Amino acid sequence: MIRTFRVGLLLLGSGLSSLVWAHNPICECEPAASDEVVCTGGFSDGSGAPGVTLDVISYDEEVLVPGKLGDDSKLRFKRPDGEFYVLFDAGPGHVVEIDHTEIETP
């Protein structure tokens, strides 16, 4: 009985320790040239996000720029005309949306 209790505590502690190591997604987009935007993605633990999906989507849900972050965790694209948002999608619970109004115009 005591051994079962200790094993249970060990498993509970192991599960809680994963919460301590949890990391949140981070994505920033900024103007890079007169008609370009560069977005950088990563996680709050300082790790990058190469290969993570980053799409530029119109308000009517049309994917304007399908993309993946490069080895440097960045994606550069021509700024679309009209309203759009950027979707950084590293999986369930790791999604960031950036509206075009949050990206400065040069």
Image (spheres, rainbow, N blue to C red):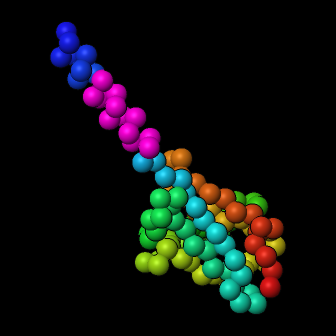
Residue most toward the top?
A: 1
Q: Residue at x 76, y 90 (%)?
A: 34
Visible residue check, residue 63: no
Q: Residue at x 74, y 87 (%)?
A: 35
Whole-percent x, y for residue 77 in the image = 63, 81
Front position in the image: 83 or 60: 83
Whole-percent x, y for residue 84 in the image = 75, 67
Q: Is residue 94 above or below residue 17?
A: below
Visible residue check, residue 69: yes
- Give the quarter of the figure containing the N terminus: top left
Q: Main secondary structure of the magenta part?
A: helix
Whole-percent x, y for residue 59 in the image = 76, 61
Q: The magenta stretch spans which residues?
A: 9-20
Q: Is residue 99 above or below residue 39?
A: above
Say if the magenta span includes residue 11: yes
Q: Residue at x 77, y 67 (%)?
A: 102
Whole-percent x, y for residue 85 in the image = 71, 65
- Give the quarter of the figure containing the C terminus: bottom right
Give the total number of marks visible in the rendering: 0
Q: Residue at x 53, y 53 (%)?
A: 24
Say if the magenta span includes residue 10: yes
